[in-house]
Image: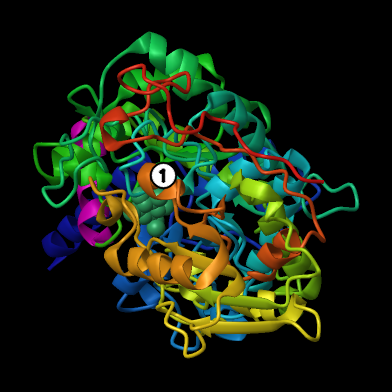
Amino acid sequence: MLGGLAIMVLVGSIFFWKQLLITNIEVPFESPPRDALYRLSAYSVTERVADLLSRMTLQEKIGQMALVEKNSVHDVDDISSYAIGALLSGAGAKPNDNSVVGWRNMVAEFNRSALRSRLGIPLLYGVDAIHGHAGVLGATVFPHAIGLGATGDEALVEQIARATARELRATGIQWSFSPNLDLPQDIRWGRTYESFSDDPILVTRLGAAYVRGLQDDRGGGTTTLSVLSTPKHYIGAGGMVWGSSSNKAFKVDQGMTPEDETLLRTTYLPPFAEAVNTGVKSVMVGLNSWGNVKLASEKYLITDLLKGELGFSGFVVSDWYGVYEIPGGEYTAAVAAINAGIDMVMLPFDYKTFIKNVTRAVEKGDISEARIDDAVRRILTAKFSLGLFDAEEVNDVPEEAIGTPNHRALARKAVSESLVLLKNEASVLPISSTVKHIRVGGSAADNVGQQSGAWTVEWQGIDGNWLPNSTSILSGIRTRAKPGVTVEYAIDGTFATETVKAELGIAVVGEKPYAEGWGDTENLSLNASDLHTIERMRATSKRLVVIIVSGRPLIITDELKKWDAAIAAWLPGSEGGGVADVIFGDAPFTGKLPLPWPRSIVQLPLAPGGTTKDGTQALFPRYFGLRIY
Ligand code: BGC
């Protein structure tokens, strides 16, 4: 009996001392008092982080490094029991009630579980607000980044990011995986429109403006961050070689960027370097490879270059399942990524195995505890910098901040500024007040879902007019047309009255929404049905304006000759009225092409420096755009 007791005491004390060795803390399993230093806002972020870190067990530290997709959390208490650090809504992952209240309640419920954990470390909740908080019904949907690139307007981009920050915080979210700083050399890539341009100078300028806007919206002189910005995808994304994708369904996305350090430093690095200078606290690494090495295991690029040379002190997060694309199985992949400098792993699914694997790796010495501490210190610093530990700083933006008239007016202005006038024969634009009969047709004329593109409510976008309070291009034209002007609409360009020619035809055509590798394509022509619509409208209108709604330049070389005017409208988002503002002359045409517009597919990929692959002239060079004031 006594012998048994002695064995139990011995085992118990070995367990206790083992915990001490692993965790370095005095009383590992008790909750710290309410006035523990890290809970007090009077101390600096550095002091609070150091105090909190010193109280954490190994498992709690590793939990902070896990970024889990919200639909993978089957028991909300897991967030507390596994001390999980961060959750995300993958594209299209929304609450059942997809309203501002629904989002707020969902995020709050997850966060309550985090706060119930021993140390009460709040959760970071991230979404891809890449053109506004567009997953939420009722949010303002701004033009996709390529349209903002066409505006070239830093102040506008900063304001848009500020508005996006407010809409995010209205739903209780303080983390966005944006801006996108990729440089699409090959516009056949399905992510071209997520980027501002293929010009590093423009991307650097607009990227920094976006970071400032997203992070600094609190006002009142506070240094607390508004929303954590995560520039992506570090690095070389946009330079992937056609046909090199590691995903068999894709061509460019997740492909291989040739290992060329000079190109890396002159082209891909500057936008990230500037984001770091602007005070960004988190960066996402891409799903592409650098030469043969997947980015998530690229120690030289992550640890030496980003953290060392650029002095980045924030945390590095991996993208989606990217870590597990490192060869060798889940254990080896996690070890390689964390040792390469990944601080937070977007798992996004199985957190239990991840925590087990990384714990084992530290116990075996495959990952040093110092590396874990460094990662967690970076993550906690971001959390304190956002004010997440200080109740008065959270949920300080009312629900009404979603989709406000001011935000919508800003989006409408952005649409106007983003339009690029490619051709304007006989000054058909702006539309003269003498024009009394207008016909409108084409697949994108009356379709807010199409004009918003992907990453709008659903990952691959939506079809039709079901975003609340939004305006299609057609409805903008109808509203603006003066009394006495007839506006007829037929999606396919067939009009009952067509024996009489209209003074003006406006064909609004373009691409259906697509996201990521699903938009990789070799065919950049207008689709057959849009081409028919244009033909019909050409025959029944004295003058024809074609508005192209697309995420990238399309090949229009042959058709353009038959049109009187052509406009690149990119993916304008929820405020289609911005198109009417410009074509009727209420706002000027000032947009400029953010990348060259190729003459034919054989000119692709574009070469860095804004030229084409074969050195022949593009149909329109980068920064082309006719101006009308
Ligand atoms: C994309 C990222 C995005 C992440 C989370 C990935 O598929 O590559 O850009 O941030 O999903 O939604």
Q: Nearer the viewer, residue 394 or 208?
A: 208
Reply above or below: 441 against 490.
above
The residue sitting at 75% across, 77% down in the picture is 481
Q: Nearer the viewer, residue 621 or 353?
A: 621
Region in magenta: 350-365
The percent coordinates of residue 619 (x first, y second) are: 45, 33
The percent coordinates of residue 187 (x first, y second) are: 36, 40
The quadrant in which residue 528 appears is bottom left
* Residue that sits furthest to the top in the current view: 262
- The residue that label 1 is drawn on is 192
* Residue that sits furthest to the front in the current view: 499
Classified by dominant secondary structure, the portion drawn in magenta counts as helix
| Crowding near the residue tagged with mark 1, few <14, some 14–19, many ≥20 C-alpha atoms within 10 Å | many
The quadrant in which residue 160 appears is bottom right
501 displayed left or right of 220: left
The residue sitting at 39% across, 50% down in the picture is 559
The residue sitting at 36% across, 33% down in the picture is 369
455 displayed left or right of 336: right
Q: Quadrant of the N terminus?
A: bottom left
* Residue that sits furthest to the right in the current view: 220
The percent coordinates of residue 267 (x first, y second) are: 47, 20
Q: Nearer the viewer, residue 295 or 538?
A: 538
167 displayed left or right of 82: right
The percent coordinates of residue 96 (x first, y second) are: 44, 87
The reply to whether residue 7 is visible in this rendering is yes
Q: Is residue 355 magenta?
A: yes
Mark 1: which amino acid? Thr
